[in-house]
Image (cartoon, rainbow, N blue to C red):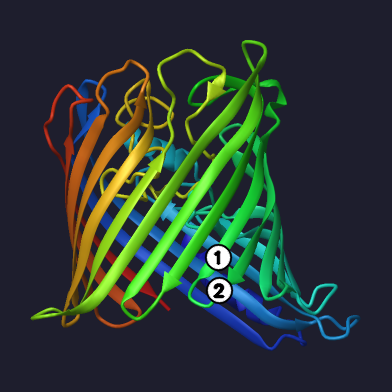
Amino acid sequence: MKRRILISAPLLLLAALPAGATKLDLFSDVEVKASNYQHLPYGDGRVSQAIYSENAKLGFIIKGIRLEKTLDSTMDVGIVLQSIGAGASSNTVTAPQFTDAAARLQNSTGAPYVKNAYVKIYKFIKPNVTATFGRQDFVLGQGITLSGGDLGLPGGRLEIANAWRGVKTDLFFFRQFKTDRYIKLYGGAAYYPASEGLWQVYHFWEVDDGDGSPSQDILFNGLSKTKKFTGLRYVLTQSQLSFDGEAVIQRGSAELAAGGTGKYEAHAFMLKGAWTQNVTFFGRSKLRLGYGRSSGNPGDSSNTDKAFFPAFGARNSGLERKGYGAIAGASLYDMIKTSSTLNGMPAGVSGLNVINIGADLPYKKLLLSVDIYKFRASKNASGGSLQIASEYDIKAAYAFGENLSVSAIYGVFTPLSLYPSGKQAKLISGAVSARF
């Protein structure tokens, strides 16, 4: 039934194509992946999980639909279907490290769901304004604070070109569902193209009205909460050197379930750089360096939460983590679950320091990548160790062309002194990716 729906969809769209439309774009993206995780730390024990996953997207975009009652406006109508599943069985993924990722999806059994459904209007009200309404893809900055991921973000967005002296601005409002409630996200961003790089500054509100039921944050339970994020990003790209740096301040307040009010005072930053040059035998290679940190909570009791923790930062892809380290999948504030805490780290530990050194070494059509990571907590409420883990990953990718590639990853994750055992966790993964 699922295949019949996917095959019939383009035929129905072609039949319904408006006479004023100029183009129908179809695209697909399929990744078939098999991963075997061994000896992942969880509390005082170890968990292993084999995952076979299929992640497929099928998109239809009708472009250039003329709006007759306007001077020169056109619109696009887009629909993207996504299917994410772990084989034929709905209970294949049982390890706690992956059940949260599956639970966030509209469907994780392989049945297709609507990832994007939007209308994009060009020359909306004014010639330099583009408006997008509906469930859409959106990433703010590096994705530290806000990203649609596999779900998209429902709402509206205005893009204003050359709003003032070459500055481009975005205004957005989204209403996204998380766990058992809707959270409002609204704000704006400005982009300034300098002579040697691109500056971006943004500010947005993350509002959880609560609807009378509390939700757990890193430090306290809140009946309602408002977090405010202010960020600055600078991106530089040259022939050999590239740099991407972003810093974010988190402020806000919460109505506590225990009574009274709480405050948010936190921050985070991520700096990434890369140097490209020719290397004997391999050819044009790249050395990558990255360092990031987020604030955490000290041990003293307080109504001020100093742990940086946005609700919708980029942290998952399909049924697995997405981030620093193939196993850890760390963001700047959480990682693959090694305990039942909200951030996945041992109880009382918050904030992350991430260090990454990596290299990409091409050989003909084969690309070899090696990455080394070190993870350290920012704060430990008990005053104990801050050492979380180290990890190294080796990846090989082979491209058959622009539209087909195969890849394999071998990763080793070594828990450090925050865990009772330093026994290594390992990952062996292989994937086939195709698109058109």
Dividing the picture into quarters, in which one does residue 390 lie? top left
Q: Is residue 339 visible?
A: yes
**Amino acid at circle 2:** Ala
Q: Is residue 423 above or below residue 212?
A: below
Residue 413 position, x and y percent, is 18, 42
**Residue occupied by mark 1:** 199
**Neighbour tally class for label 2: few under 14, some 14-19, many 20 plus, Cα within 10 Å:** few
Q: From the image, which quarter does the C terminus lie in?
A: bottom left
**Residue occupied by mark 2:** 194
Q: Is residue 421 above or below residue 431?
A: above
**Neighbour tally class for label 1: few under 14, some 14-19, many 20 plus, Cα within 10 Å:** some
| Horizontal side, residue 232 vs residue 425: left or right | right
**Amino acid at circle 1:** Trp
Q: Residue at the location (18% across, 26% down)?
A: 417
Q: Give the structural element (helix, strand or loop) at label 2.
A: loop
Q: Residue furthest front?
A: 195
Q: Earlier in the sequence, mark 1 or mark 2?
A: 2
Q: Is residue 325 visible?
A: no
| Horizontal side, residue 126 vs residue 27: left or right | right
| Horizontal side, residue 273 vs residue 408: left or right | right
Label 1 – label 2 distance at C-alpha: 7 Å
